[in-house]
Image (tube, rainbow, N blue to C red):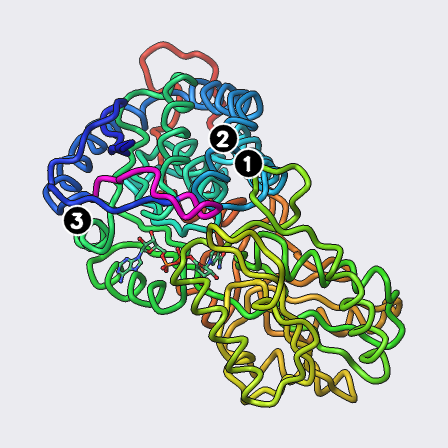
């Protein structure tokens, strides 16, 4: 059985806790590896190594750091297919989607190559007579990332590229469900010339997470995962004096107005709802059909579903792979049963689909006439289930979104620029798409939701990422008048 170790001090380190967790190939249901689960002691040892590395790394010149980032970006590009294959083998998503994930993470590395510019401070000459004031940005020291299963490469890259470029040492605790991508990234960092100890991987579960949250040497924690855990991370981390950004779950609504381009809206709904088996925090899980667009829209979505090819992510023909675990598949299937019992109209039932027998496959589900009180509406299902809620007006559609617990992403489909602009103004969500179903910000903006989708006040990567992983220092300086030496060098005396 393949054993997945930690990465400490620039090399693999076998776990010593005696605890391991199973890693499966979701397309076959076979266990492919055992991952070491770190004890609190092992986390403390890893953090001590990272702390020493952080001291030296913060002294590395900006030019040196940029050079490492450029090289890392090149290595990511050159190894995209290999990393994508690792992602698919443990997560299940189709290879093209896995390669897309790497490409998005690579953009974060590209952004971080600009670190010399991003670390610039401000300068005010002559704030008072002979006095200058300036600000500088400095790294925090050792920072940590705790990441979810659904983007095992991209989410770590959201965090570590910026954190490392800013001069921190970064300790990653990846999801124990698909930990191999993290170790692959560690090897690329080493090959890029990153000094040992600046990038660390501690594999583990709650024990490792708690050890991170309470370790006094860790200055900041960046988290992405489900809302209950995000809340726990935020509360525990801040109670231990850390800076925390904790991104949580989502229930993303896509509003379709009667004037929308029907085919474009239907295509968008299908790809955004069922891509990666709906296991995306920016997946569309509710289509809000406004007015008389509902019948033709539901028909157009339904007509596309039989053409979706479900199969192993390694099959180039597959458009949708399996779910992450057997338990998760059962949970999602349970929601389909519940939605049916609660009175939703079942247009397509994923439980009846013809899918591969092995592995954790589930077909796609389309539920129409879903009402806000139903569990399929209120809960984050995180599977290939799309709910359609019908409203008569834009105002009702907006109210649904603004009343929702989550506020990650949302989208509007319309030909009316004024309506889109009003929506952008009105809606309580962190990321808004106009005729774009999954509005993930490019790397030079920042990613984050509102409400229960984010605990903390700083979004992830981009300018907010630099802000999160640095602290500012303001220097006020006064020098004696020049030319006070005995030799007259001709300095003016009019200061
Ligand atoms: P999860 O919350 O179960 O796990 C996330 C991380 O927390 C993992 O590293 C896990 O080991 C750790 N963890 C789990 N339970 C814990 C506990 N009791 N105590 C301490 N640590 C614990 O999330 P997941 O199932 O891996 O990922 C899916 C979730 O992540 C969904 O809710 C999805 O919406 C969310 N997500 C959000 C975003 C975003 O940007 N907002 C992005 C991706 C995923």
> In the rendered image, which residue does mark 2 sit on?
83
Label 3, residues with CA under 10 Å away: few <14, some 14-19, many ≥20? some
Distance (Cα) linking label 2 and label 1: 8 Å
Quarter location, residue 438: bottom right
Image quarter in which the N terminus is found = top left
In three-dimensional space, the C-alpha distance between marks 3 and 2, rounded to whole angstroms, equals 31 Å
- For residue 182, what is the image quadrant? top left
Tag 1 residue: 102
Residue pointed to by mark 3: 215
**How far is mark 1 from mark 3, CA to CA?**
31 Å
Magenta span of residues: 25-37
In the rendered image, residue 8, in percent from the top left (x then y), is placed at 23, 29
> What secondary structure characterizes most of the magenta part?
strand
Tell which circle, 2 or 1, labels the residue nearer the N-terminal end: 2
Q: SS of the residue at dot 2?
A: helix
Q: Is residue 445 above or below residue 426?
A: above
Residue 94 pos. (x, y %) = 59, 43
Instruction: Indicate left or right for 33 with 252 as reference.
Output: left
Disc 3 is placed on an element classified as loop
The percent position of residue 351, horizontal first and vertical second, equals 56, 68
Foreground tag (2 vs 1): 2
Asked if the stretch drawn in magenta spans residue 33, the answer is yes
């Amino acid at each position: 059985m393949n054993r997945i170790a930690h990465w400490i001090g620039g090399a693999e380190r076998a776990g010593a806790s005696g605890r391991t967790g199973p890693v499966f190939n979701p397309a076959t249901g076979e266990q492919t590896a055992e991952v070491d689960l770190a004890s609190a002691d092992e986390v403390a040892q890893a953090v001590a190594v990272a702390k020493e590395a952080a001291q030296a790394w913060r002294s590395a010149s900006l030019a040196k750091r940029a050079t490492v980032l450029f090289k890392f970006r090149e290595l990511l590009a050159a190894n995209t297919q290999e990393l994508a294959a690792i992602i698919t083998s443990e997560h299940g998503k189709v290879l093209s989607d896995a390669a897309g994930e790497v490409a998005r993470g690579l953009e974060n590395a590209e952004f971080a190559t600009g670190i010399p510019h991003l670390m610039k401070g401000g300068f005010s000459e002559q704030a008072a007579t002979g006095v200058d004031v300036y600000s500088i940005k400095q790294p925090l020291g050792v920072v940590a990332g705790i990441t979810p299963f659904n983007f095992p490469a991209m989410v770590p890259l959201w965090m570590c590229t910026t954190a490392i470029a800013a001069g921190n040492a970064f300790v990653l605790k990846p999801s124990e469900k698909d930990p191999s991508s993290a170790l692959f990234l560690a090897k690329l960092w080493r090959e890029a010339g990153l000094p040992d100890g600046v990038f660390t991987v501690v594999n583990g579960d709650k024990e490792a997470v708690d050890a991170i949250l309470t370790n006094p040497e860790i200055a900041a924690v960046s988290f992405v995962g489900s809302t209950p855990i995000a809340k726990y991370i935020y509360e525990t981390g801040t109670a231990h004096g850390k800076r925390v950004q904790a991104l949580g779950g989502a229930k993303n609504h896509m509003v379709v107005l009667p004037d929308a381009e029907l085919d474009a809206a239907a295509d968008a709904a299908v790809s955004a709802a069922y891509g990666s088996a709906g296991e995306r925090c920016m997946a569309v899980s509710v289509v809000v059909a406004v007015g008389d667009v509902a019948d033709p829209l539901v028909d157009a979505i339904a007509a596309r579903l039989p053409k979706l090819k479900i199969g192993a992510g390694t099959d180039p023909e597959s458009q949708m792979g399996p779910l992450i675990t057997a338990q998760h598949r059962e949970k999602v299937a349970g929601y389909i049963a519940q939605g049916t019992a609660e009175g939703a109209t079942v247009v397509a039932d994923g439980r009846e689909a013809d899918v591969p027998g092995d592995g954790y496959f589930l077909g796609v589900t389309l539920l129409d006439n879903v009402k806000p009180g139903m569990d399929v509406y209120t809960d984050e299902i995180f599977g290939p289930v799309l709910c359609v809620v019908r409203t008569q007006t834009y105002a009702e559609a907006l109210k649904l979104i603004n009343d929702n617990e989550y506020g990650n992403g949302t989208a509007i489909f319309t030909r009316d620029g004024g309506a889109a602009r009003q929506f952008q103004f009105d809606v309580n969500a962190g990321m808004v798409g106009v005729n774009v179903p999954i509005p993930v910000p490019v790397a030079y903006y920042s990613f984050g939701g509102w409400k229960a989708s984010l605990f903390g006040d700083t979004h992830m990567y981009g300018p907010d990422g630099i802000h999160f992983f640095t602290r500012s220092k303001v220097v006020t300086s006064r020098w004696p008048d020049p030319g006070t030496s005995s030799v007259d060098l001709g300095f003016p005396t009019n200061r």
